[in-house]
Image: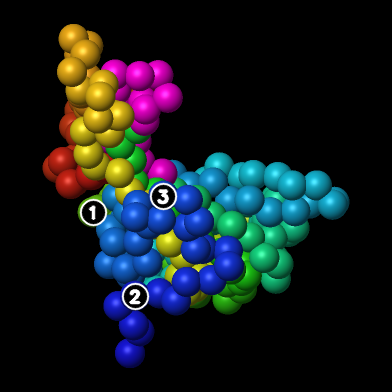
Amino acid sequence: MAKDTLDKTERTRLRRLHEKGSYEREVIHQILDAMPMAHIGYVMDGSPSVLPTLQWREGDHVYWHGSSASRALRAMKGNQVCMTVSILDGYVLARSALHHSVNQRSVMIFGEAEQVMEAAAKEVHMKRMFDHIFPGRWEALRPLQPQETKATAIFRMPITEASAKLRDAPPADDEEDYALPIWAGVVPIRMQLGAPVADPRVLEGVEPPAHLGDIRIG
């Protein structure tokens, strides 16, 4: 059985502001589940690179996908990568410039990128991605074509070397500055879904499906 708290490593241990860090598996999973947008750092041709992509979690693994022809994904295969997922929750305005901050939730994961090779497994994982990000959508679509599955690369890595960093608090000013007549506080930031906008080529009479109401983010 997986431990509730991940072990700290030299790569995940927070050295500054360590009180903002968390190694609790539940906290890390909640942040990953709330924000599909991720950035993956890797090395290609000896140079550092970062790939923005969508991620989804299945148990104690995190997954991402892309084109089988992608140079970035080929460079990741079997190599160490670093994934970050971040959610900006608010601007923190203090009484001095250097005490301004942000309320945020973020996760950093280190590990080896493993490619899922079997076609049937790839389709299973793609469906799970849809079930997480677009609940109810998969069943409304035409079936995947074999060439589409072949053209899609899916990678994963275990969530075993990871940490979260969180801030959800008012400004932390110097004690003497609280007597200053300067407004301070938090300006919240929230991501929200807008009203669906139909593709101009949607057939006449086709209405937005009910499952659009099940999409969540943040």
Q: Quadrant of residue 186?
A: top left
Q: Amino acid at mark 2?
A: Thr
Where is residue 18 shown, x and y percent of the image?
A: 41, 56
Q: Quadrant of residue 37?
A: top left
- Frontmost of labels 2 and 1 is 2
- Name the residue furthest front: 176
Would residue 71 appear left or right of 67 to someone viewing this image? right
Question: Which quadrant is the C terminus positioned in?
Answer: top left
- Name the residue furthest bottom: 1
- Of residues 75 and 16, the one nearer the viewer is 16
Could you say which disc has been placed on residue 136 in the image?
A: 1
Would residue 126 appear left or right of 136 to someone viewing this image? right
Q: Which residue is mark 3?
A: 17
Disc 2, SS: loop
- Frontmost of labels 3 and 1 is 3
Q: CA distance from mark 2 to mark 1?
A: 33 Å
- Of residues 105 and 57, the one nearer the viewer is 105
Could you say which disc has been placed on residue 5 in the image?
A: 2
Query: Does 138 lie within the magenta span?
Result: no
Mark 1, residues whose alpha carbon is within 10 Å: few (<14), some, or many (≥20)? some
Would residue 22 appear left or right of 110 to someone viewing this image? left
- Of residues 132 and 157, the one nearer the viewer is 157
The residue sitting at 47% across, 51% down in the picture is 16
The answer to whether residue 128 is above or below residue 70 is below
Would residue 125 appear left or right of 140 to someone viewing this image? right
Where is residue 119 shown, x and y percent of the image?
A: 55, 72
Evaluate whether residue 120 shows in this view: yes
- Magenta stretch in the rendered image: 86-101
Q: Amino acid at mark 1?
A: Gly
The residue sitting at 25% across, 53% down in the picture is 135
Question: Which quadrant is the N terminus positioned in?
Answer: bottom left
**Mark 2 vs 1, N-terminal side:** 2
